[in-house]
Image: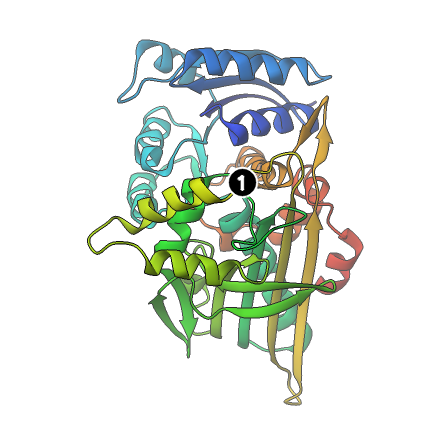
Amino acid sequence: MTEHYKIVIAGSGGIGWAAGLILRELGDFTCDLFLGDMDLEKAHLEADRIEGGSERTGRVEAFLLPQEGTSAELVRILQGAHILLDCLPGGEAPRMARLAREHRLHYVNLTEYVAETRQIEEIAHGADRGFLLQTGLAPGVINVLAHHLFQAFCHRHDVEKVDRISMRVGALTPTAEAPHFYGFTWSTIGVATEYVQPSVVVRGRRTLSVPSLGDVKPLLIRGVLYEEAFTSGGAANLPDALAGRVENLDYKTLRYPGHYAWAQKVLAEAPEGDDRIEYLHNRMLAEIPRVEDDDRVVIWAAVEGRGRKNVLHRMEYSQVVHPCIVGRHRLQAIQSTTAGGLAESARLLLKTGRTGVVHQTDIPTQAFLLDGPFVRRLYELDVENLKAIAR
């Protein structure tokens, strides 16, 4: 018998409504969706978009999300629900997590904010429902992919430790002009934030905080030249979870050559005492166009180390994801990859009943990447290649 779930989504922005559509249209279950937003008109608009864009049935209801605390309507919506998908800005994550804990719901979120993640870990401690944190693309699927490669490498070469784990993701336009060599495909404030907040890396088996936009290097992926640089948030819990087992680990964002030189120059021009994130954000809004009709997400993960015979080996996987059709709607690559990771994480909790805090390294990698209905399809993964890697 097919399972039926009551799913609550907080936030009806581009990721929220896309997650609702993906869950309804591609899930191996049926569901009733409740889509909340602090702008009720927007919530209704996006709920209608989901219902009108899907071939499948099930209730889709919009509701007003209070700007703080809770409300009688929100309590009604949460009662009897199975899971809360948090698609709100990261600052709202602790409030949503508390509501999930109070109403005994599973909870998944997208935020890469470190302080809020620590708060949620405390909120979820001892919970009888699962709290899967930092899902989406990066952090999210890229970490599960890297962990998959790490496990496969250790198994194939009969080792416990590796020299290097590299995670790279870029959300890019097909073309980019000088001087910035960039076009926005998604959140402008998100980009500015990840360029300014520090990045967490592992160097010499020590976990360090280093400035973002550092260590800029060229990288060829499938014959295309990119530049990589440290940015915040993408490493998730891998530095802690793999402590002592990896010599060097880092997450970097991919851009076209020339972009990072422009971003560094702009930040160097920020007046003393100004908020650097706000200054960079305003300069980006003024000088970089938004390009929403076409985008691509470039993904690369690699694990490198020495086998028993001291031969240096590298195991890697790359993918370029393009916009796709789900139901009657066309989703951007950044939209489908982010919402797809969220949806797969929600399914994992619903199907397995995991409890307490669940991090990226707690996810069974093959089941997540290859067996579920969301990531495998939306990321256009080479399933046979990934299965062969794991043998």
Residue 141 or residue 224, whichever sits in front: 224
Residue 28 visible, this angle:
no
Q: Position of residue 227 (x, y in %)?
A: 57, 64
Quadrant placement of the N terminus: top right
In front of the other: 271 or 297: 271
**Residue 297 placement, left or right of 201:** right
**Image x and y of residue 103, in percent:** 36, 23
Residue 65: x and y in percent read 37, 17
Residue type, numbered disc 1: Pro
Label 1 crowd bin: few (<14), some (14–19), many (20+), radius 10 Å = few
User: Which residue is tagged 1?
Assistant: 289
Q: In the image, 96: left or right of 142?
A: left
Display colour scheme: rainbow
Tell me the residue at 63%/89% (across/down): 310
The image quarter containing residue 28 is top right
Task: Locate the C terminus by quadrant.
Answer: bottom right
**In the rendered view, would you say 131 is above or below 304?**
above
The answer to whether one can see residue 270 in this image is yes
Which of 128 and 160 lies nearest the eye of the viewer? 160
Mark 1 residue element: loop
Residue 214 quadrant: bottom left
| Residue at x 46%, y 11% (from the top left corner) | 41
Q: Position of residue 254 (x, y in %)?
A: 56, 58
Tell me which residue sits at (60%, 75%) in the image.
Answer: 304
Q: Is residue 115 depicted above or below 330 in this figure? A: below
